[in-house]
Image: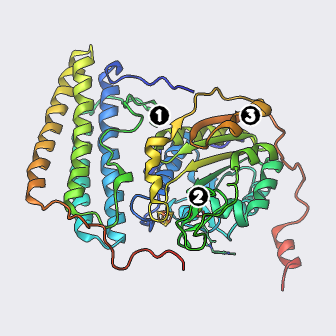
Amino acid sequence: MVEVRKAPGDIATVEEFLAHALTLENEAADGYQEIGDSMAVHNNPEVAELFYKFCKYGRMHASEVQSLATGLTLPHIAPWDFAWEDGESPETPGADSVHYMMTPSQALLLALRAEQQAHDFYATVAKTTKVPRIKELASEFASEEAEHVRLLEEWIVRYPSAEKNWDFDPDPPSMPE
Amino acid sequence: MSALPEQTALSASDFKSDYRPVWCPGCGHYSVLSSLTKALAELAVRREDIAVISGIGCSSRIPAYTNLYGFHSVHGRALAVATGLKVARPDLLVIVAGGDGDGYSIGGNHFIHACRRNVDMTYIVMDNQVYGMTKGQASPTTPADWDKSKLTPHGTGVSPFHPLAVALAAGANFIARCFAGDPNGTARVITEAVRHPGFSMVQVLSPCVTYQPEQREWKNTVRKADIVTTSEADLAARWLMADDGLSTGVMYKGHRPVYRPELEETASVADLEKWFAV
Ligand SMILES: Cc1ncc(C[n+]2csc(CCOP(=O)(O)OP(=O)(O)O)c2C)c(N)n1
Ligand code: SF4
Ligand SMILES: [Mg+2]
């Protein structure tokens, strides 16, 4: 069955827009926390630390959105009813591309992709909305996300990129004999 | 679903425990946990009115990662435990969760009869076509030519089990397939499954990145089915048998009679304890 999803430009009110922004930041932070935990459990402390850092930034941004929403009643939106373009919150890090031996540069690239997607979402809202206050907020959030992208790009060049055999494990998860 | 008291405004994270999952990074089961907790938040049922029952396997660890009543039971026996619980406590929302090995190998017969009894509960099978926990042996849903395990170096050579067709034939009242790469879509289907009366079967394609790393490709091959949910079992059966197993959606929502014993309690728990004293 083909589902018809709301387009970002169809977000009708400031409250609805802030509900999107809040979920976007919260789900990004939750996603980073979860990947950080999985790295910590699998003995990759350096990468775990990076993901916990991203999580902290996500929580900070969520609380900034929350303060913008002070005095407003944000609507409840079911997870599948958000105006995300592919059905998932755009800044949620792609957990399907993580690996227990991933390197810091790969973690940064994953975060870069998430920030880029968040930027694209806000930029689309800003470009397509007909509500002036939503346009203003979305443009502001898009430039903040663009700044995160720039910072991550700077950060990435400071880390060596993953070596060719980065996932070589001398003691791999064994297959039964 | 029977009428359960509503809880106001809990978020998905309110349904997660403080235990950090030990699943491999990238495992699809993380996403199923997220879908389940999102669905429970939407259903707005009080935490103390929910029980999550599982068997054994990586997937079956899921009750520990929720802060609900749970029972990480015996391999293949989750449905038997859950059936007993729901029949004794019809007021509870009972979720059963586990893997393809747990549900279709050792638990295969319980699976068939749970569908046939059609007790009101939702069964989520995290299907990665492998025994993840015991390090990568073939399971009933493994393709016949999968030759990556040293136990089946030339493939299993046998046709994979077809869980949804079996569930439909055996009497399940709700049949759906989801993908771990679509957590919000999966949350929606779980919500619908819980709301539909009777035994709801939800197969979630959930990649095992360690022993079936080729399943990372599912994000490019799994797609939403172009179907309208039917209540006619023959139509659903024809569609299921023609599909390649990679289409997602709710295929069937039936009106089959739900098993609800109306018996009055005839003995107290104290009496039962006396009879079973060793
Ligand atoms: C009675 C019994 N037999 C065998 C086992 C070994 N065993 C543990 S988990 C498992 C298979 C799990 O596979 P699945 O249910 O697909 O879960 P996954 O780990 O793939 O998520 C087996 C055979 C056991 N624990 N108990
Ligand atoms: S072995 Fe496979 S199923 Fe088990 S946690 Fe790892 S990726 Fe998941
Ligand atoms: Mg399995």
User: On screen, B131 above or below B120?
Assistant: below
User: On screen, B195 above or below A97?
Assistant: above
Q: Which residue is mark 3?
A: B238
Q: Looking at the picture, tell me which residue is in the foreground, A50 or B40.
A: A50
User: On screen, B128 above or below A166?
Assistant: above
Residue at position x 13%, y 54% in the image: A156
Separation of marks 3 and 1 at Cα, in angstroms: 29 Å
Report the side of B208 relative to A27 (left or right): right
- Label pair 3/2, CB-CB below 8 angstroms: no
Q: Which residue is mark 2?
A: B129
Looking at the picture, do discs 3 and 2 lie on one chain? Answer: yes
Amino acid on which the number 3 mark rests in the picture:
Arg
Q: Is mark 2 within 8 Å of ligand 3?
A: yes
Amino acid on which the number 1 mark rests in the picture:
Trp
Q: Looking at the picture, tell me which residue is in the foreground, B9 or B241.
A: B241
Q: Looking at the image, is mark 2 or mark 1 nearer the viewer? A: 2
- Label pair 3/1, CB-CB below 8 angstroms: no
**Badge 2 density bin: few <14, some 14–19, many ≥20, Cα 10 Å:** many
Rendered location of residue B245, percent (x, y): 61, 44
Looking at the picture, do discs 3 and 1 lie on one chain? Answer: no
Q: Looking at the image, is mark 3 or mark 1 nearer the viewer? A: 3
Rendered location of residue B170, percent (x, y): 81, 47
| Mark 3: secondary structure | helix
| Mark 2: secondary structure | loop
Split into 4 quadrants, where in the image is the N terminus of chain B? top right
**Badge 3 density bin: few <14, some 14–19, many ≥20, Cα 10 Å:** few
Residue at position x 26%, y 34% in the image: A70
Looking at the picture, do discs 2 and 1 lie on one chain? Answer: no
Split into 4 quadrants, where in the image is the C terminus of chain B? bottom right
Residue at position x 27%, y 17% in the image: A129
